């Protein structure tokens, strides 16, 4: 059965709580033809973060999806499964030794704004959890289950920190010499991936 929608926002002016659900969200939640008992999981998409200018130009761009959970709530098993699939589709980092990359290499995509192809590095799906409703009223916040502060969150959203490791981001295009492939478990999703270790020049 489709779960009851319970996300609310607080109005600072009248001090009341109101539903955060959109009209379409309410319609699809009440549509008995699109119910979890019939094999559907519908996840509303929170934020797509797109850095369209790097190195002073628009030929190399960065993208990630961020799912927001408020009031310390966790993903349901159905949401985790769906978002894990999106995470796998969204990744294309080839030159990495991270344990949970599923990517297959550089992707060239067409930018309708710039009317030409660019290289897009996709960092997959990430979950940002607040103890409250957002950074301003939360005692803690977590990025993929790792506790962070507001300054780290800002740097993550600016792609100054790697969204997978929380370390300084490396935007260089490396040239590989050799690769080793092994199977590992993604600690966030509990699924198995092939890990490619690249020896870089």
Image (cartoon, helix red, strand yellow):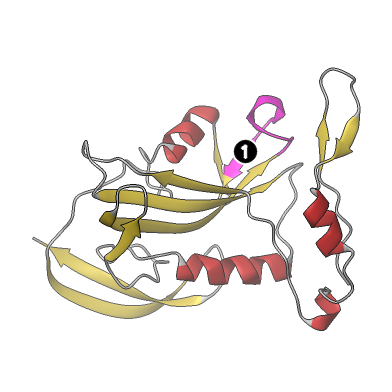
Indicate the position of residue 57 as horizontal and vertical percent values.
22, 40
Q: Residue at x 31, y 44 (%)?
A: 169
Indicate the position of residue 178 as horizontal and vertical percent values.
13, 74
Q: Residue at x 30, y 48 (%)?
A: 114
Instruction: For mark 1, give the secondary structure.
Output: strand
Question: Looking at the image, can residue 2 be seen?
Answer: yes
On whether residue 135 falls in the magenta region, the answer is: yes
Q: Which residues are magenta?
A: 131-142
Q: Compare residues 140 and 10 and report the one nearer the observer.
A: 10
The residue that label 1 is drawn on is 141
Residue 3 lies left or right of residue 56; in this view the side is right
On whether residue 34 falls in the magenta region, the answer is: no
Quarter of the N terminus within the rendering:
bottom right
Total labels: the figure holds 1
Residue 174: image quadrant is bottom left
Question: Looking at the image, can residue 97 be seen?
Answer: no
Indicate the position of residue 97 as horizontal and vertical percent values.
29, 64
Q: Residue at x 77, y 41 (%)?
A: 71
Quarter of the C terminus within the rendering:
bottom left
Residue 75: image quadrant is bottom right
Q: Compare residues 30 and 104 and report the one nearer the observer.
A: 30
Q: Compare residues 142 and 49 and report the one nearer the observer.
A: 49
């Amino acid at each position: 059965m489709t779960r009851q929608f319970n996300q609310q926002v607080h109005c600072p002016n009248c001090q009341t709580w109101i539903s955060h659900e959109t009209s379409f969200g309410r319609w699809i939640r009440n549509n008995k033809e699109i119910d979890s008992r019939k094999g559907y999981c519908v996840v509303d998409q929170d934020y797509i973060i797109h850095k369209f200018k790097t190195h002073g130009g628009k030929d190399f761009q960065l993208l990630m999806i961020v799912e927001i959970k408020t009031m310390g709530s966790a993903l349901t098993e159905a949401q985790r499964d769906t978002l894990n699939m999106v995470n796998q589709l969204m990744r294309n980092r080839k030159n990495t030794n991270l344990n949970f990359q599923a990517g297959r290499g550089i992707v060239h995509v067409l930018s309708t704004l710039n009317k030409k192809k660019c290289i897009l590095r996709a960092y997959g799906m990430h979950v940002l959890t607040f103890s409250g409703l957002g950074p301003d009223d939360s005692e803690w916040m977590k990025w993929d289950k790792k506790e962070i502060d507001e300054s780290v969150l800002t740097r993550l959203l600016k792609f100054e920190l790697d969204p997978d490791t929380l370390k300084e981001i490396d935007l260089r295009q490396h040239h590989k010499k050799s690769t080793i492939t092994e199977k590992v478990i993604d600690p966030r999703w509990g699924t198995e991936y092939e890990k490619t270790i690249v020896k870089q020049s």
